[in-house]
Image (cartoon, rainbow, N blue to C red):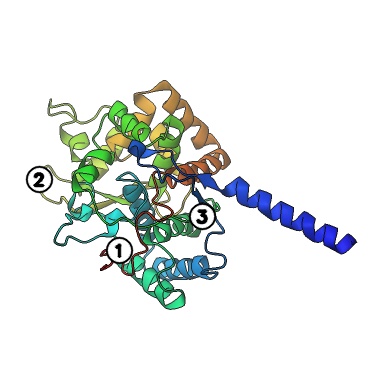
Amino acid sequence: MAQSRSSLFVFALLALASVAFSHKIGGGGGGNGGGGGYYLYPQFYDHSCPRAQEIVKSIVAKAFAKEARIAASLLRLHFHDCFVKGCDASLLLDSSGTIASEKRSNPNRNSARGFEVIDEIKSALEKECPQTVSCADILAIAARDSTVITGGPSWEVPLGRRDSRGASLSGSNNDIPAPNNTFQTILTKFKRQGLDIVDLVALSGSHTIGNSRCTSFRQRLYNQSGNAEPDPSLDPSYAAELRKRCPRSGGDQNLFFLDFVSPTKFDNYYFKNILAAKGLLNSDQVLLTKNLQSAELVRTYAENSEAFFEQFAKSMVKMGNISPLTGSRGEIRKHCRKVNRN
């Protein structure tokens, strides 16, 4: 009797844990929520593909061992996917008859990368459990694993997203925040997805790893306000250093660390750099200079990496819950680059 009571208690705890980490669908971008009352929850593949997360983790680790930059690239894929039509792997689709690929948009062209790693993960999962794990969920898990492998926080990834049968090139061009957007435009784009100013500052902290191209910040070095002057909010000595490899013309694709202090380590130096007027992108520095609430958050995260890590994990779960396809909507693609043939 005691043993059966104990078993019941354990089962109740597990049920509570499942509810605690499950996320009701329906919030986020543009009112395309999953509908039907479906939940995302971390245990979604526990029976249908129990090794799914282990497989993703091992392939991300292998890719990271070859090239540290891949962690930031995979994290960014999830972000650029979720901001367009929700977290539905629309970004992964190549152009075909009826599909104009989001890979061709201004934010992604010559910039979004890591697709081959996603292909490798999908191929391994198709061998393990055919047509079970969605490409959208692969992006969400890979983003978490990329954060962890670079020293950042971990979190339980709610799962159960399905893959879209289409893409939105115009959505990709219009909905993803751009490096030269004003603070208000960036905040508006976040709010459109059901995210707030706290999410904006915390998720911007992903720029603690990765690179940016000269073309993404050149105007700050030479002509920030149309007056042929550099951005006054950019540290002059840092600007002089950047100009060496980012000339007025040419060198568009030259890469620069977003966080020059610890470029491959997920930490809070991104925020410390902003306080020192050494944020690389305009969209980084305006977090300090254009809004009192965001400036206060920058200071908090610069002083307290635990506060940043905790909020980053929460905001990643929230972002991952933007308008997923669930239930019978969408499909489980066999190949992430193309929709299934009916």
Type of amino acid under label 1:
Phe
| Farthest residue, direction right | 1
Kindly give the residue lying farthest to the bottom in the view shown: 127
User: Which residue is painted at 15% across and 32% down in the image?
Assistant: 223
Q: Of residues 233 and 82, which is closer to you in this image?
A: 82
What is the C-alpha distance between the residues marked 2 and 3? Answer: 36 Å
Residue 108: where, in percent of width, then height?
Answer: 23, 51
Depth-wise, is mark 2 or mark 3 nearer the camera? 3
Q: CA distance from mark 2 to mark 1?
A: 30 Å
Q: Secondary structure at mark 2?
A: loop
Mark 1 lies on a secondary structure that is: helix
**Of residues 54 and 192, which is closer to you in this image?**
192
Q: Position of residue 295 (x, y in %)?
A: 43, 27
Q: Please give left or right for residue 341 compared with residue 311 in the image.
A: left
Image quarter of the C terminus: bottom left
Along the viewing direction, whichever of 273 and 206 lies nearer the viewer: 206
The residue wearing badge 1 is 115
Residue 249 numbered tag: 2
| Residue 38 in picture, x, y percent from top left | 49, 49
Vertical position of residue 219 compared to residue 57: above or below:
above
Q: Is residue 183 above or below residue 119?
A: above
- The mark nearer the N terminus, 2 or 3, is 3
**Earlier sequence position, callout 2 versus callout 1:** 1
Q: Closer to the camera, 177 or 330?
A: 330
**Is residue 303 in view from this perspective?**
yes
Residue 151, label in figure: 3
**Residue type, mark 2 in image:** Ser
Q: Position of residue 40 (x, y in %)?
A: 50, 51
Q: Among all residues in the image, which is located at the extreme left?
A: 249
Q: Is residue 322 above or below residue 195?
A: below
